[in-house]
Amino acid sequence: MAVPPASWTILATLRWTADYFRAKGVPEARASAEILLAHTLGVSRLDLYLRYDQPLNPDELARFKALMVRRREGEPVAYLTGHRDFWSLDFRVTPAVLIPRPETETLVAAAMEVAKSVGAGFKPAPTLEEKVTRNYIAQNETPPKTENREPKTSALWGAEVGVGSGAVVIALAKELPQLAWVGLDTSGPALAVARDNARRHAVLHRVHFLQADLLTALKPAAAFALLVANLPYVPRAEWERLPREIKAFEPPGALLGGEDGLDLIRPLIRQAQQYVKGGGWMLLEVGDQQAPQVAALVEATGAYDRIETIKDFNGMERVVRARRRDSTG
């Protein structure tokens, strides 16, 4: 193992920690060291190199070493800092929620691609009045109760099932201001995190959160122009092979999808046809090699006239997207 430096300057601390993490088998050793040190000092990663010769004081060094030990034991960096970037937005995360993954941005992009077809274009520049109003609501509004209520038909509505940290629905709310949203999750602690993130990003007045099992808390009505879901889809056999960093720290209920990974996706597909309006879209994130089976389940409903699969940046089929058949057509 590397010899401790004579002086714990920022650069010396980074180098020693990266070497230490590599020796302990910590993934992304250098990046982990940079993020944790920047978090400890309250600066950006770039600042670490601009202040490379600045020494750490005893308190800073003690706090950094405490984080370093937790990272060595496998605790994810996002839980150690309490933050994760997604869609160029900063989200608060806790062990109550799954850490947002870069590949899930495919779900956001796929929804935005079809948004115009349901009458939801991209965000216009807000007026001064809108800015003032949004800022006030973000600081003061209490989330409205939505139990057993149909979304108002005067507005375009979208829904996310399984919101977790709220990353997907908040990113879509930021990009598609013509839509109001319902965000559903079975976990109360996860919904608390999602509400906080919606407040921080000034969209809480347009995203109504509800603790519910899939769509069962809403009255069946073809109300949603977009319905997106990133439900647990990891098969049990794959779960057993996941690294300790995931299995020991992230919530199993946000990952495990039963024997084949589709325990929640199947009932959602059955329910969704009652909630997606004609011409609207359902988008489901899926795991490796699940897209053909999920697409077949969607097709078997007979409720959709166009079914597509979307690949992520690794070339994996990540999203199944289906357009609801228009009963008037």
Image (cartoon, grey):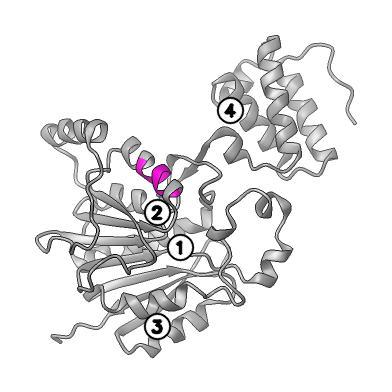
Chain-order first, disc 4 or disc 3: 4
CB within 8 Å, label 1 to label 2: yes
Q: Is residue 296 left or right of residue 239?
A: left
Q: Quadrant of the C terminus?
A: bottom left
Residue matched to label 4: 45
Q: Residue at x 51, y 70 (%)?
A: 286
Residue 92 place in picture, x, y as percent = 46, 38
Chain-order first, disc 1 or disc 3: 1
Chain-order first, disc 4 or disc 1: 4
Q: CA distance from mark 1 to mark 2?
A: 9 Å
**Label for residue 168?**
2
Instruction: Name the foreground residue: 24 vs 245.
Output: 245
CB within 8 Å, label 3 to label 2: no
Q: Is residue 287 left or right of residue 123?
A: right
Q: Residue at x 32, y 69 (%)?
A: 216
CB within 8 Å, label 4 to label 2: no
Q: CA distance from mark 1 to mark 3?
A: 16 Å
* Front position among marks 4 and 3: 3
**Residue range (magenta):** 190-195
